[in-house]
Amino acid sequence: MGKPNRKHRAAKQRARYGGADFPGIHAEAEGRPPTAEEIGNAILAAAMESAQRGARGGSVQRDPVVVFAGRLAADDPVVHEMERGVHLSGQHLMTRVFRNGWLPADIHQAARRRVDDFAVSFLIDTMADAVRPFAPATVDETWVAQLGELAADVWWSDSAPHFGQWAAKHMLTTTEALTTVIESLALLILLPKLELIRPLPGTARPTAAVPHHVDEKVLGRVRGLLAKAESTSFPEEAETLSAKAQELMTKYALDRVLVDADTAVPDLPGARRMWLDTPYTDAKALLIDVVAKANRCRAVFSAAWDFMTIVGDDADLDAVELLSTSLLVQATRAMIANGDKASRSDEARSRTFRKSFLVAYATRIGERLEAATAATIAESAEPERLLPVLASHQIAVDAAFDTLFPQARNRGITIRSAAGWDAGRVAADRARLDPGRS
């Protein structure tokens, strides 16, 4: 084919599919219907263009995507191949995202922040379809749990492509559905490479040691204390209940590390992610960080996507997740309550005051949790035996953290409200870390 003819046919393709040069659909120029693979490539190219526009402008630009989707959906002879092309492009990108370290819960958290509910539902279905070929015994328990929490199951019939059934379920036109698909895939393209913290589907070993999670009875008592802490309107009582929960978890953890020290197979460090809601995510990340340190873990904050990755033993990770979630609720309540005071209502409702409040609150809570943990260790039955075991445990956690995050660096948080800082310290100081004493 001569160069002028190629340019002419490329121009016809751009005119037909919305004005953009999406590679993959060459069939029209060759006088044949496009294949599913060619349509899938065109959908991927449209998603790439949408992702690039979103990366440059901060949000996905819909217009070119809608035009492309409308032209493709209006082409009746290619609708069936288009449905297969949607499947191929979705599975291609989802497999890549899995390999880049994203877990089902991570994908869901990113999606609910950046795309609409229809796109979220498409991504959940795509995850379920991507995991389906693997034997259950080869799928890691974290994947199974997260997919279960998302209700990610294969609800559609295999007698027809998923795309049409999904569009009908949500009462979307073909153009609307294809536009949503492209926006969903654009989000997947934007997801960066993360650390692989759990085995990929198909690679989990059925004979691997079962992670040591916290005993359900202990978790039940801790959840009960934290539920009371979140429901009370008295800050002193809330913080005392939270301190009691920390004490219980610490005592359980110390007993466990001594038992593990006597076993031939140690409980190796794992990792977990916690996603944060705006605003003040860096201040909230600091609160999670101090809770992690008090529970023998290490944490790192991804500011671009607002999540924390925490490294530690599974039981300690359970403690961090429980306590952090509750303390975030309590800290936010204390911040808002402080802003309701008439004497300082204007300043206490400003962003600088509230961020400074949360940073001070986190800092002081961290100091008190560390002191409570040290006191629990000192009062243990075998402190002289416990300290070397804890030191060895910390070395293992540090090594795992440095392997996952060799480039991690500490960074500070600017405080711009002295009043907010003082108020946060006062709120955190109300806690009685030894609930048995006044």
Image (cartoon, rainbow, N blue to C red):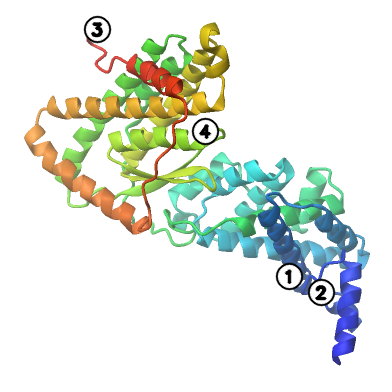
In the image, 421 versus 220, the foreground residue is: 421
Q: Which of the numbered marks, if any, corresponds to residue 216?
A: none
Ranked by sequence position, the earlier of labels 4 and 3 is 4
Q: Which residue is mark 2?
A: 25
Proximity of marks 2 and 1: CB atoms separated by less than 8 Å: yes
Q: Residues within 10 Å of mark 3 (few under 14, many from 20)?
A: few
Please provide percent x and percent y for residue 25: 81, 74
Please provide percent x and percent y for residue 403: 33, 58
Proximity of marks 4 and 3: CB atoms separated by less than 8 Å: no
Q: Which residue is mark 1?
A: 41
Please provide percent x and percent y for residue 126: 65, 54
Q: Residues within 10 Å of mark 1 (few under 14, many from 20)?
A: many
Ranked by sequence position, the earlier of labels 1 and 4 is 1
Say which of marks 4 and 2 sits in front.
4
Q: Alpha carbon of mark 4 to alpha carbon of mark 2: how far?
A: 46 Å
Q: Which residue is mark 4?
A: 280
Q: Alpha carbon of mark 3 to alpha carbon of mark 2: how far?
A: 76 Å
Ranked by sequence position, the earlier of labels 4 and 2 is 2
SS state under label 2? loop
Q: Quarter-wise, where is residue 242 in the image? A: top left
